[in-house]
Every structure is written in C-alpha cells, then in structure tokens.
Amino acid sequence: MAVRRRSVRPSRQERFVPDFDPDFGDRALTEARHDIVIGRWQGVRDLLAATGTDWARRTHRLRLLSHAAAGSSTVETWRAAEPGNPDAAVLRAATEVVRVFDSAIAAGRGAVVERARIDAAVDACRGAAEAAPADPMPWVSLLSVARLYEGGVARRELRHWFDELRRRDPYNTEGHIQVLRYWSARWHGTHGSMYDFARDAAGVAPPGSSLPVLVQVARVEEYRYIADGALGRGPVRGFDQHWKHELAVTELRRTFARWIGGRDPGRPVAPEEVGDLNFLAHAACYAGQVEIARDVMTLLGKRAAWVPWSYTGDPEEQFTRFREGLGVE
C-alpha cells in the first residue's frame, strides 16, 4: 500500500500513537480488573450484574476478567462468599480454562497437559452452565478448552457444545473463533476444515454481524501456522500473495459489505467490536484495499489490538504506518 507523503513532518509531540488498551475503552471493565488484582470481588459482581444479557459485551468482559483472575484467588473468594451467585460460577469456570492454558504454555510446545486438569476445567464449565442456563459463556469456555485434549474431543461432543452455544447466542463471535481454532491445522484439523467452518458461519450471519470476519481470522491462523513451521529454515515463500490473492480480496470485500455495510453507521464502535475490527483492518491493509482499510481505520480511531498485528511485525509501527499512509486523521 503506497504511503502518502506529507509536506510537513509532524513533531514528536504531534505524532500519532495507537492506544493498545486491552479493555478497548471499557472503563468499567478496567476498574473491575484492577479490583481483581487487589483481591476485591464486589466490583466484579456489580459489573456482571449490570451487563445483563448483552451477550457480546458479557463475553468480552468475562474473557478479560478471567485472565485477570487466573493469577489470584479472588474468584474463589467470591464463590465462597456467594455460592449461589451464577456469575461467580461462570467467571470461575472461565478462569479455570485460562489457568489450564497457562499451564500448557508453561509446559512448552508439544507437551501434553494432564488430562485431570482439563477434566476439572470441563467440570467447572458444566457446573457454570447449570448455574446460569441462559448464559452462552460456559459453552464458549468449553469450546476453548476442548482443543487441549490430546486428540481433541469426540466430534459429537464438540457439536453438542457448539449447538448449546448457538441456542443461547447464535452469532457469538468469540465462541465461533474458538471452534475455528479447534479445526485449524495447529490443533485438530486442517487449513481446509478451518476455512470451511469460517465460510459456513459467515454465510449464515445476518447483516451487521461480525461473524464474516472469521474468514480473515482463518487467514491469520494459516499465516501463523506456516510462519511458525518455518522458524530456523529461512523466510517462507509465497507470503507476498497470502493476503492479496483474488480469493483473499473477494472474501475481504464480502466481509466488509456484510458486516460494516449492514452495521448502523451512527452507532459508536463498542469495546467488544474493536478486536474483530483490527482483524478486518489488518486484512485490508495487507491486501492493499485502500478504501476498505481507510473506512475501518477511521472506525477504529486510536484503538489498536496486539493481535493480529503482532504476527506480522511490530504492532505499533504497522498500525501507525498504515494509518498515516491512508491519510486517516
């Protein structure tokens, strides 16, 4: 993508700096995550109660709260204080899943996670589903932890969990992303099975839904897999066209038309949309689709996400370079 030259170079004080706020501007979430770190659970309880049945916002908040809670006993303290609170059960289940993933990362690539640990996380998720029967989040958590089983889970089991998610929130983007990763070549599938899932889900999404971006997420997952496999063997060939070949561009345009074209243009970007919009912006920038990239970057403003930019270089440098090249003010 060509970078537009400016006649006056901005001063250091004026230069654009992207905002990599992990909460994507959700100030109430930031406060609640801080409470968790210092051992307070009351603010978390109040935040989740106020979120209600806004499933997209709730999933976003629970996902980030679980990462904050994984290194402390705050969620267990809450469960002990309010054993009948379903939100505490749901957060604890999500936190157990994060802890199992953390142990897998600590063990290193190729190491097998102790099955009993995964089973315990699954049991916590099932308990949360019973405590909060309308909530999709326990099923998102199950779909996340499923890929840690050596050899995966039975296809019918995965299908059951996915069906339960869709019964509660049929277009839950986070849950779909977890299934996409399950079917990726990195885990229990192939590039083909991953793309098939992404395209099928995108094809039934209603106008304005972010689900079509699954295809761009799949493209990033393929890139990661091949790039990781090339470590120590020199650069991977053919990646100059990975983002911009005909099918990639066609699918990018389709995602933009169905998601952004069907979205209320007067509605502000919600925190839970920012991560998905960064996938779309990344795809558009690397495909050289200037108009789409400019529109999405304008929607984002300063709100950047480490993923997927971190997979293709320095996130801040890329986000800033593309944004300035597009002339986004």
Image (cartoon, rainbow, N blue to C red):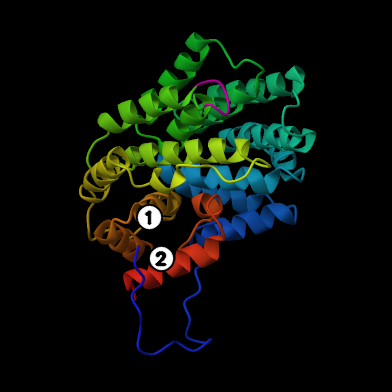
In which quadrant of the rendered image does the N terminus lie?
A: bottom left
Closest to the observer: 166 or 285? Answer: 285
Which residue position holds label 1?
281
Which amino acid, mark 1? Ala
Which residue position holds label 2?
322
Closest to the observer: 95 or 321? Answer: 321
Q: Quadrant of residue 324?
A: bottom left
- Residue 224 % position (x, y): 54, 40
Q: CA distance from mark 2 to mark 1?
A: 9 Å
In the rendered image, residue 282 lying in the magenta stretch gets the answer: no
Of label 2 and label 1, which has the lower sequence position? 1
Residue segment shown in magenta: 185-189
Q: Residue at x 29, y 38 (%)?
A: 247
- Label 1: which secondary element: helix
Q: Residue at x 52, y 87 (%)?
A: 13
- Residue 142 % position (x, y): 56, 25
Q: Quadrant of residue 164?
A: top left
CB contact under 8 Å: marks 2 and 1? yes
Which amino acid, mark 2? Phe
Question: In the rendered view, does 67 fall on the left or right side of 132?
Answer: right
